[in-house]
Image (tube, rainbow, N blue to C red):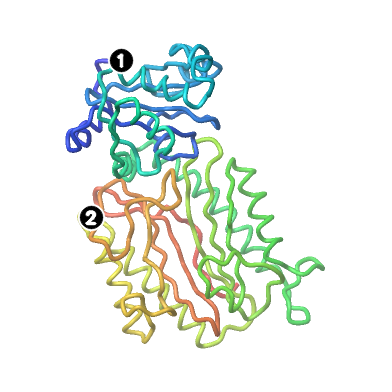
Amino acid sequence: MTTEKNPLDISEALQEHKSDAFMIVGNSDNADMYYSTHFFASDSFAYIQTKGTEEILLVSEMERGRAEIESRIAGVLTLQDCNYRDKVKERGDPSLAYCDCLADILQRHGARRIVVPRDFPYHIAQTLKEEGFSFEAIKSPFQQLRSRKNESEIEKVREVQDACNLAMKAAVDMIHKSEEMDGKLNYHGFDLTAEKIRNQIDITLLEHGCESAGTIVACGMGSANPHWEGTGVLRPDEPIVIDIFPRSKKNRYYADMTRTVLKGEVSDRLANMYEAVLVAQQVATEMVKPGVKCNEIHGKVCDVFEERGYDTTRSGSSVGFIHSTGHGVGLEIHESPYVGEREIVLEAGNIITIEPGLYYPDVGGIRLEDLILVTDEGFENLTEMEKMFVV
């Protein structure tokens, strides 16, 4: 067992809940699992941290070598170390045998009172309860740790945002180079569609080691639905909301950016909406620094909009500004801290979005989103892409 201090020490959370160990079972799609182990596997494996901060990683036998090289956990065990095959024969059920392996490890470390994340597998918890263990589901203690990025994590997010910047430039360039033809945007002799823009975004991201699912390219009145992905032909004189949230295929960190553009003639109403969103974003971004409360930033955004005559969430409106101001970004696209109505205090190392928007079904939506790092002195905007409405 290592004598070095565990950088992911969650012993205070264990003491608070009077527990002997914290356990996660899942694969690397679980952000806490990847964060705590730095190990990527598509099959399920287990992570345990005891109240003495000792860490155990339980993997299949075929993953032992890779886990010992790639994971940050010194204590790597395999199912065969726990006599898994014999347990399968005894139980006649691989799932029950797996639970018995976990029970052996917990007993070996004197752990009877176990805390688990709220999405912990029910079957495993129930089986181990029958074997004398007690369980409590808690908010993951890793979520707060994950919200404060170290230099390595910041650089990973920065790299993904750089790729996102290139993808956004490619998308906007296609719209800029398009021409109006019969009430549609035409690009190199073909109708320019949301699907074609998304394809170009995907190609650009893949060329830089990233991938993105659910990219938004929403044109016209449908863009008043903030999460409508968009489909079909893009049209002139209408807002086009482009929201890209890529993830690195290698390090699994996300980035996030939104721009709204228009090809053709812009109406006064849309121009005023865009200006209001731009001002609201600028005001909110300038507020970002350690110690500032997220609800104060969100409240100021509502002030900016309401002073200009727009509806906001503060009055319970279903149009206008109808979502929070932002959210944390890291191993999940939406994670702590959330820049909304909750009184959450920003800390250095937080990476958040600032993304005000206005949405009216009779004209469409406008949203601008930048990725902001909270620094010791204030903030750094990680988003280089310019903001230009009419392209």
Q: Quadrant of residue 189?
A: bottom right
The location of residue 157, given as percent across then percent down, is: 44, 44
Q: Amino acid at mark 1?
A: Arg
**Which of disc 2 and disc 1 is earlier in sequence?**
1
Quadrant position of the N terminus in the picture: top left
Above or below, 208 relative to 338:
above
Q: Is residue 249 left or right of residue 76?
A: right
Q: Nearer the viewer, residue 59 or 69?
A: 59
Disc 2 marks which amino acid?
Val
Rendered image: mark on residue 242:
none
At a point 45% along the width and 55% down the height, the residue shown is 383
Above or below, 183 relative to 356: below
Residue identifier under label 2: 345
Residue at horizontal 57 percent and vertical 67 percent from the top = 228
Q: How far apart are labels 1 and 2 at the CA level?
A: 40 Å
Closest to the observer, 49 or 5 = 49
**In this view of the protein, which residue sits in the foreground, 220 or 143?**
143
**Residue with the mark numbered 1:** 108
Q: Where does the image place residue 190, in percent across and percent down from the top left?
A: 80, 67
Element at label 2: loop
Q: Nearer the viewer, residue 243 or 118?
A: 118
Residue 164 horizontal/vertical position (percent): 54, 52
Q: Looking at the rendering, which quadrant does residue 176 occupy?
A: bottom right
In the rendered image, the vertical position of residue 261 relative to residue 12, given as above or below:
below
Label 2 Cα neighbours within 10 Å, binned few <14 / some 14-19 / many ≥20: some
72 displayed left or right of 14:
right
Q: Secondary structure at mark 1?
A: helix
Q: Residues within 10 Å of mark 1 (few under 14, many from 20)?
A: few
Report the residue at 45% width, 45% height from top. 158
